[in-house]
Amino acid sequence: MSRHLSRRSVLVASAALGAFALTTLPAAATSTPAQIATSKTNGVAYLKSLQAADGSYAGSGLSNEWAFSALASAGTAAVDVTPGGDTSKNARTVYRDLLSTSSWPSASPVVTDYERATLNAYAAGIDPSRVSASRNLIANIYSYWQTAEPGYFGPSANFNGTVFAALALNGAKTQSGQIRVPQALRNSMITRIRANQHNDGGWNYGKAEGNPGQLGAASDIDMTGAAMAALCVSGVPNTDTDVVQAKDFLKGKLVSGTGAFDAMFGVNTDSNGWAVSGLNACGIDPQTGDFLTADSKTPVDFLIAQQFNPGGGFKYLPTDTSPSAYASIDGLRAVAGGGFTAAPPVPTTPGAPQWVAQSSLASGTATKLALTVDDGSGTPKVCAVTLTPTGTTTTLGAVLDAAKTAAAPSGCVTSLTPSSGAGVITAVNGKANSGSNTWKVSVDGSSFASATRGKVVSVGDTIALRWGV
């Protein structure tokens, strides 16, 4: 196993792939639409061959669940992927059942476990915040917010956790296509991603902010693709200086004769796939302009040249003689025009819905809800609130009351006025309504409206409180 693949194995077990997907590439590209279509068809066939007899792609430890984001990018719904045509074992149902178990992901989970699951559940057509009555992946991510270093998720030394938080929280939209997290939270992640950009325009997996030596170190192709995608899905335009610098870094790593990127661990499919997915997520064409070499080669040309046909798998290194599952996932996603996740396609299986989700809270079953509290100071408080509902819905007052004693991290809500009833909330954490500046609430990205204790809160709702006009 190569050094790069060994490193990737560790990262894939604890890191996530994620962002939006562009579904087509322009006709003027070097690789023709017909070649891309063939690559997608054969690539999907290979990924289907990775499904286990029980219908699974994921399991304990390292697994092939990233196939869901690649399949979705290529237009194939996870619910349509079945072992031997057995629809009762379709990939989506089996994956949802896994995510719903109390033992998943492990006894010692890390934030990237939940980011990985969020990106892949979304692509599979499973609402990440409503996997089951007790499983809310968005809230799971919120619980890793770093209060002492706002904007980071998980230990800041593992910068990739913050990048994939941005990819997951922004890329995994609601079923109606709404970004479910508030702008204040998005801005905090953007600030940290910008602060970790190296002097050469790229990024690496570890923290560089505040460390001149790390900021001056060589960047990684893979992480540059992921970080630029994280900026773009967070709302940063591709004309932004930091995105342009990342694009220029990647351009400077092109190998003219093949269209490959000269990665830290040598030319390989995975690095090329991540870089192309970053370009795709930012709406930057990987086949024309800056990414068409003097030898008329592009990164997509390189990826297609790495694919075995008609078998459909992609090899990791140009010298390999057999396909790699991870290279095939990364390669297909990129060739299909995908970022790091994609909206689930409409299934072809009769009667199968595009989305599956828990429809209500289960009385007596503990659940988590994602909460941000923005008092206008510029830094929101972020936490996951644990509560045990007594009905199929709860109220905002009940959630905020629970947040005082059962939030991770703690301190999200320390005081609340009024302390009972269903009326208008007049103060949170000592910050009182003042004139037109009042406490307002948004759920799943909806418009902010007056916050009342009696506001109904349903399973999986992502709640944002904000003080202001």
Image (cartoon, grey):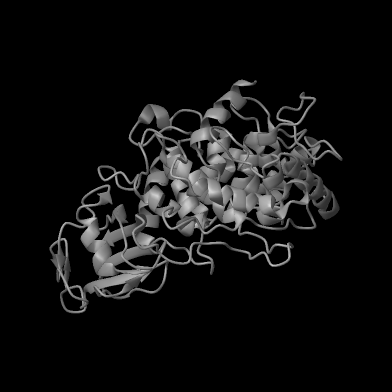
- Give the side of residue 441 with respect to residue 61, left or right: left
Question: Residue 419 at what x, y percent from top left?
Answer: 14, 68
Q: Residue 391, located in which quarter of the rendered image?
A: bottom left
- Give the side of residue 225 with respect to residue 208, left or right: right
Residue at x 63%, y 64% (from the top left corner): 354
Q: How many marks?
A: 0
Pick the quarter of the image with the N terminus: top right
Residue 254 shows up from this direction: no
Question: Residue 139 at what x, y percent from top left?
Answer: 38, 53
Q: Residue 451, located in which quarter of the rendered image?
A: bottom left
Residues 251 and 430: in front is 430
Question: Residue 197 at what x, y percent from top left?
Answer: 44, 40
The image shows residue 385, relative to residue 346, as above or below, that is above
Residues 268 and 62: in front is 62
- Give the side of residue 164 with respect to residue 29, left or right: left
Pick the quarter of the image with the C terminus: bottom left
Residue at x 74%, y 34% (from the top left corner): 256
Question: Residue 72 at what x, y percent from top left?
Answer: 66, 54
Residue 115 shows up from this direction: yes
Residue at x 63%, y 59% (from the top left corner): 344
The residue at the far front in this view is 364
Residues 468 and 217: in front is 468
